[in-house]
Image: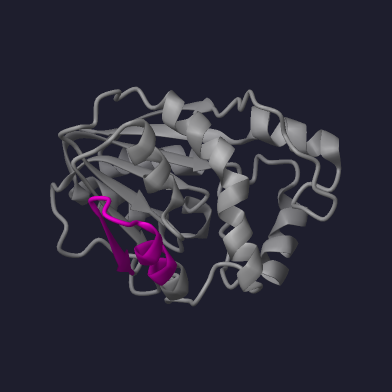
Amino acid sequence: MAEDAQKNIGTWYIDPDAEDRMADGHAPIWRHLIDLILERDLTDKSVLDFGCNQGGLLRHLYAIRPFRKALGIDIAETSIAKAETLKGNLPIQHQVGGRLDGWSEEFDLALSHEVIYLVPDIDAHAADIWRALKSGGVYYAVTGCHTDNPLWPKWRELVANRTNTVVQDRSITDYGRAFEKAGFDVSARKLEYDGFIPFVADGWTPDFADALNYYTQTKIVFRLVKR
């Protein structure tokens, strides 16, 4: 992110209770994502979670594939404080912010889940992650928030009304071009979540059919390898 990088906030959701519930809702998706990661043995690896919120993804990852150390970074100050209280004695460090200043060729693996659509300058973000990764390091960036999502016009309004963040309008191709330009070998797949999806009456997809399509067809996992 460049000089117009998104400023620090307290929580992602305007409603702090919704922030706490978000981790429970994401947990099955995180476990599915972890199963898709091709790097199986992380015992001697360093991991970055960009946009970690309350740190749940890193805690899930450590429980399934223990790593040597990790950094979780997020612009939400209250969420980072919560992540610190929840990490226990895990080898995880948390940091408030949206830049990776001071982290150069540090990480073997980077993750982000539904974060890149909020980044004001995707080219600067791609360059930031590239610098932070070791040679051959891999970045898994997951999002269903793109202009190829048929629900996007409605979701833009929901994000504006429910959260403290500002969305960006980008296509799947826009993301691919930005990361390729930064020096990544770019590939992607559909998330294709294969678990049962709960019905949530006032959720992001009040039409249940849309929810089923979103988690199986719309949500994308980029695999970005540093050249």
Q: Nearer the viewer, residue 3 or 144?
A: 144
Q: Nearer the viewer, residue 58 or 208?
A: 58
User: In the displayed structure, does residue 137 sit left or right of residue 57?
Assistant: left
| Total residue callouts | 0
Q: Nearer the viewer, residue 137 or 77?
A: 77
Q: Position of residue 87 (x, y in %)?
A: 35, 56
Residue 169 visible at all: no
Q: Which picture quadrant has residue 64?
A: top left
Which residue in the rendered view is the most extreme toward the front?
88
Q: Position of residue 121 (x, y in %)?
A: 41, 61
User: In the displayed structure, does residue 173 sit left or right of residue 25?
Assistant: left
User: In the displayed structure, does residue 186 sit left or right of residue 150?
Assistant: left
State the residue at coordinates (37%, 46%).
Answer: 58
Coloring applied to the structure: one colour
Q: Quadrant of the C terminus?
A: top left
Q: Is residue 50 above or below residue 183?
A: below
Q: Is residue 183 above or below residue 55?
A: above
Residue 101 visible at all: yes
> Magenta span covers which residues?
80-96
State the residue at coordinates (72%, 55%).
Answer: 155
Q: Is residue 217 magenta?
A: no
Q: Position of residue 189 (x, y in %)?
A: 51, 25
Q: Position of residue 19 (x, y in %)?
A: 59, 64
State the residue at coordinates (45%, 50%).
Answer: 56
Q: Is residue 68 above or below residue 80?
A: above
State the residue at coordinates (60%, 42%).
Answer: 144
Q: Quadrant of the N terminus?
A: bottom left
